[in-house]
Amino acid sequence: AMAADIHADIRWTVRAVRDDPTQIHLYPVITSIIERFQHNTGLAVEFRRPAAEPALPFDALRHLGYIIEEALINIWKHARANRGWVEVTQSDDAIQVVIGDDGIGFDPVTVAAWPAGSRGWGLQNIAERAVQMGGVSTIHAAPGQGTRVQITLPLPVANGETAPSHTMLEDVWHLFGF
């Protein structure tokens, strides 16, 4: 099943690049990620969003997709949650995406103090991707209170390619562990 998912993601990315990336939109990307996650894990994830879908550049969609996948994987691996959610909100000057759960939570200060080799790369990857889009990531968590990963991006959202040597193909290879 995992190989099929990886293959589907690679096909999606190649098709988006080959065809017209302007036809890729935020809500279908998030819906696809949530559906695949629920299918693979059985964990319910609600998608909360306003009717008006924010228009984002392709690279921002790609980065947000990776962030949402990473945050959902963290929920599955660590939260012991009964449910999760992805919420999109937009104001005049920013878009916000929150990935949350009703799990066991954690103390971010304690986790940040762990030696580098004893913690994963997920939250760091999320923070780096948010910065590449000109935004910030904030972790809201406490023991027994669940976790929320909040991504805030100023509008208009940056294209996300701040490092010229960082190509989409490298991203796909990294994401799928090749």
Image: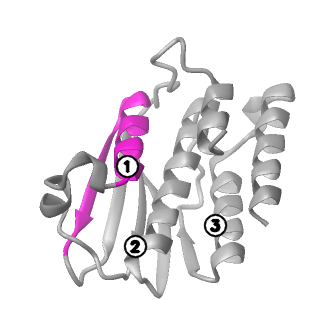
Q: Relative to the observer, which residue lies in front, 44 or 116?
A: 116
Q: Relative to the observer, which residue lies in front, 82 or 119?
A: 119
Measured as percent of width and height from the top left, residue 16 is found at: 79, 35
Query: Which residue bears the numbered disc 3?
Result: 34
* Pointer 3 or 2: first along the chain: 3
* Magenta stretch in the rendered image: 120-142
Q: In this view, does 55 lie above or below 100?
A: above
Query: Which residue bears the numbered disc 1?
Result: 151
Q: Do the residues labelled 3 and 2 touch (CB within 8 Å)?
A: no
* Pointer 1 local density, CA inside 10 Å: few below 14, some 14–19, many at least 20: many
* Pointer 3 local density, CA inside 10 Å: few below 14, some 14–19, many at least 20: many
Q: In which quarter of the image is residue 92?
A: top left
Residues under labels 1 and 3: Cα distance? 17 Å
Q: What residue type is labelled 2?
A: His
Residue pictured at 20% horizontal, 60% vertical: 111
In the picture, the quarter occupied by the N terminus is bottom right
* Pointer 1 or 3: first along the chain: 3
* Pointer 2 or 1: first along the chain: 2
Q: In which quarter of the image is residue 4?
A: bottom right
Element assignment for label 3: helix
Measured as percent of width and height from the top left, residue 138 is found at: 27, 52
* Pointer 2 local density, CA inside 10 Å: few below 14, some 14–19, many at least 20: few
Residue pictured at 64% horizontal, 69% vertical: 37
In the picture, the quarter occupied by the C terminus is top right
Query: Which residue bears the numbered disc 2?
Result: 78
Q: Do the residues labelled 2 and 1 touch (CB within 8 Å)?
A: no
